[in-house]
């Protein structure tokens, strides 16, 4: 969660020097090179044919879809607002897992998850003046594709190490990202700033690779539904980073919403399915 909580502030830094599509494609290329080096160093054989379909879902949802949609959202949304909206991700992941794997968490689990989701939706609507804006639509789309990627990645992490799951998903995305870098760089301005470079390096190495390595391992260990609810802590952590790193000023509703959502974590983690 610490790695993921820095994603939005680092993306905001990256947008200071990179266009949105340049940022997304460079992020994928750098992460894929790191992962490819690890796969080569360990001489890991390619996955079995039956695993490539789920890996494609991971690539589409986690490697491409979520970064692209959240980056577009952060062009007009504050990191604090985006972080709280993404508090819906645990519920969408748990729902996706239940549909895909047949997991059956307890009634208490679902009640706590729905309560946290309701708080987040209420916050998003209140902050958007009564109706979701374009940034919120990007963020809601990001939730759906990321939940699918988390679910498939969590399933794969039961049969292969988590770092190989994200590593091979990144290799699938690399050819498309390389083309994307060339196209985006010719259409978007590029200004190399200290914040921009640090932001890109973090979202590539920390968010796109290292964070997902330990995340998928955790999901395989304690189960996708319960692991997903730990991500309810991410909005609160991101709010802290948005103040410390970006100097954002929070409304009273933001930390109160994050704390209310955080309280739901304790309930979901104590429940038994």
Image (spheres, rainbow, N blue to C red):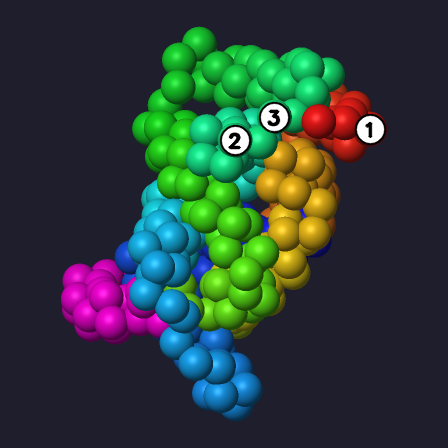
Of labels 1 and 2, the one closer to you: 2
Quadrant containing the C terminus in the rendered view: top right
The residue located at (64%, 18%) in the rendering is: 110
> Which corner quadrant of the image does residue 174 belong to?
bottom left
Looking at this view, is 32 or 192 the one in front? 32
The kind of secondary structure element at disc 3 is loop
State which tag comes first along the sequence, 1 or 2. 2
Give the distance between the C-alpha atoms of the residues marked 1 and 2, in whole angstroms. 20 Å
The residue located at (32%, 55%) in the rendering is: 53
Tell me if label 2 and label 3 are in contact, CB under 8 Å: yes
Looking at this view, is 132 or 115 the one in front? 115
The label number, if any, that marks residue 270 in the structure image: 1
Give the residue pinned by disc 3: 104
The kind of secondary structure element at disc 2 is loop
Give the distance between the C-alpha atoms of the residues marked 2 and 3, in whole angstroms. 6 Å
Give the distance between the C-alpha atoms of the residues marked 1 and 3, in whole angstroms. 15 Å
Image check: 22 left or right of 105?
Answer: left
The label number, if any, that marks residue 153 in the structure image: none
The residue located at (36%, 23%) in the rendering is: 133
**Horizontal and vertical percent position of residue 214:** 65, 60
Span colored in magenta? 170-193
**Horizontal and vertical percent position of residue 208:** 50, 61
Crowd around label 2: few <14 · some 14–19 · many ≥20 (10 Å): few
Give the residue pinned by disc 2: 102
Image check: 65 left or right of 83?
Answer: left
**Horizontal and vertical percent position of residue 128:** 45, 19
**Res. 179 visible in picture:** yes
Q: How many marks?
A: 3
Q: Is residue 144 within the magenta segment?
A: no
> Which corner quadrant of the image does residue 113 belong to?
top right
The kind of secondary structure element at disc 1 is helix
Crowd around label 1: few <14 · some 14–19 · many ≥20 (10 Å): few
């Amino acid at each position: 969660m610490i790695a993921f909580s820095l994603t939005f502030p680092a993306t905001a830094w990256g947008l200071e020097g990179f266009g949105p599509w340049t940022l997304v494609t460079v992020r994928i290329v750098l992460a894929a090179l790191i992962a490819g080096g690890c796969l080569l160093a360990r001489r890991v054989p390619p996955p079995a044919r039956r695993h490539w379909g789920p890996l494609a879902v991971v690539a589409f949802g986690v490697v491409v879809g979520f970064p692209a949609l959240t980056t577009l959202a952060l062009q007009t949304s504050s990191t604090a607002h985006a972080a709280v909206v993404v508090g819906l991700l645990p519920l969408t992941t748990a729902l996706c897992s239940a549909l895909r794997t047949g997991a059956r968490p307890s009634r208490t689990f679902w009640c706590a998850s729905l309560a946290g989701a309701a708080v987040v939706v209420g916050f998003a609507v209140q902050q958007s003046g009564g109706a979701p804006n374009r940034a919120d639509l990007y963020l809601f789309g990001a939730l759906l594709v990321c939940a699918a990627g988390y679910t498939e990645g969590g399933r794969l992490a039961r049969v292969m190490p988590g770092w190989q799951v994200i590593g091979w998903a990144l290799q699938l995305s690399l050819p498309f990202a390389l083309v994307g870098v060339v196209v985006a760089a010719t259409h978007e301005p590029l200004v190399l700033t200290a914040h921009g470079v640090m932001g890109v390096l973090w979202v590539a190495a920390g968010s796109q690779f290292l964070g997902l390595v330990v995340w998928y391992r955790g999901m395989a260990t304690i189960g996708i539904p319960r692991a997903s609810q730990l991500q309810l802590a991410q909005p609160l952590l991101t709010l802290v980073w948005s103040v410390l790193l970006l100097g954002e000023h929070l409304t009273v509703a933001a930390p109160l919403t994050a704390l209310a959502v955080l309280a739901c974590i304790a309930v979901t983690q104590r429940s038994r399915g």
